[in-house]
Amino acid sequence: MPQLDQAKAIMDDDGGVQREVKVPDLSEDTMRDMYEAMVTTRLMNERGMKLQRQGRINFYVGSEGQEAAHVGFGAAFEDQDWYFPHYRDPGVALYRGASIEEMVHQCYGTGEDRMQGRQMPNHYSFEELNFYSISSPVATQIPHAVGAAYAADLEGDDVVTGVSFGDGCTSEGDFHVGMNFAGVWDTPTVFLCENNQWAISVPNEKQTGSETFAQKADAYGFEGRRVDGNDVLAMYAEAKRAVESAREGEGPTLIEALTYRMGPHSSSDDPDRYVPQEEIEAWAGRDPIDRFRTFLIEQGVITETEDEQMHERITDEIEAGVQSAEDAEGPTIQSMVEDVYDEVPWHLQEQADDLKRFYEED
Ligand SMILES: Cc1ncc(C[n+]2csc(CCOP(=O)(O)OP(=O)(O)O)c2C)c(N)n1
Ligand SMILES: [Mg+2]
């Protein structure tokens, strides 16, 4: 993997510390929280894919292999900062304190889902955590993040915005519009391009003629940096530096995380038809969770027993969420016409009432 020679790393592939770099100054509690968000993302991913295969939910987008890239990045922001996520980044919501139970309800689209089943599974939104709604049309979150940063700056608010997206998103107009605006107006925005080597079945060498995704920042007048995206500590260190610089008024940064999509694009994809076996094997030894676990155990931050207990506790919490979602009622017919207008307009109410009569719902 020659690309990785140019990327910054703190941990080696086995979770040991590389001597020449400085480990970021993180408390043991923060490192445990980061690890827990990564493990929860992985365990939810495994359960979510099975639920989809069993026909209990209709779709799932996994994050396997990318937990360090987004959790390390997301952990570098403060509570007042806003995060505009890519669909592969539920770990940032978990790190910010999202409830597993609520996330499972979202995947089922129950009546207790705050979006009332209107969004695709995995497309979470947590306003109270400053975690913006995940959108399916790729790259749309980029201008949103830049606009929010520009507005915060105008208001004099101490807010930096973070936005993540895939390598494929860099071919969208929204990426260039957002990057250009951020460069011209020096908005306090930190961009994360998760280069997971694929955009569904399109390999990244067909995505760009540039040598790296990081270098695209040069064209917009700010810095682009390449990081080992499977090294959560390196991701955190680079993101922290960029967030602090944005907060001090020094403008945006683009971080390219070199990582790997270790699973299918989504539950609707069959990567066996296009991903070479050698590539899967080459990345298998660089699992970001294994690397961080080894590091934490070697540094005495967690023990093997605590790690097992953490896995059991999270697995039980996911199971309780599944039970709760399967016991819950679905959204009401009335919910179909709510939440857009302050008061439901008569013509929508009439249609909802017709439908209720059809289904004999009160
Ligand atoms: C505007 C738009 N065009 C096309 C799609 C279909 N689509 C969904 S995911 C995807 C690939 C995105 O690849 P990348 O940005 O690398 O993100 P990754 O899935 O690898 O995380 C595409 C083309 C879409 N969702 N939105
Ligand atoms: Mg990709």
Image (cartoon, rainbow, N blue to C red):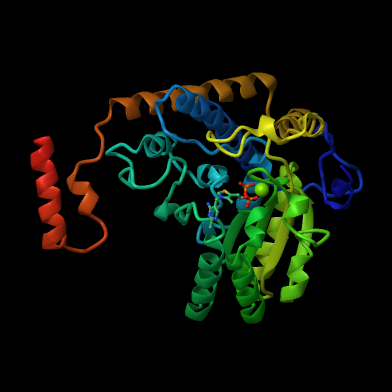
> Within the image, what quadrant is residue 63 found in?
top right
Q: Considering only vertical position in the picture, is 27 above or below 138?
A: above
Horizontal relation, residue 350 to residue 26: left or right: left
Q: Considering only vertical position in the picture, is 345 above or below 112?
A: below
Q: Position of residue 297 (x, y in %)?
A: 74, 28
Residue 29 in view in this figure? yes
The image shows a total of numbered marks equal to 0
Residue 188 in view in this figure? no
Q: Where is residue 13 in the image (x, y as percent from the top left)?
A: 83, 35
Q: Position of residue 96 (x, y in %)?
A: 51, 47
Q: Looking at this view, name the residue that lies furthest to the front.
A: 273
Horizontal relation, residue 151 to residue 76: left or right: left
Q: Looking at this view, name the residue that lies furthest to the right.
A: 20
Quadrant (top left/top right/bottom left/bottom right) for the N terminus: top right
Residue drawn at 33 percent across, 41 percent down: 113
Quadrant (top left/top right/bottom left/bottom right) for the C terminus: top left
Q: Where is residue 169 in the image (x, y as percent from the top left)?
A: 62, 57
Residue drawn at 14 percent across, 44 percent down: 355
Residue drawn at 76 percent across, 61 percent down: 214
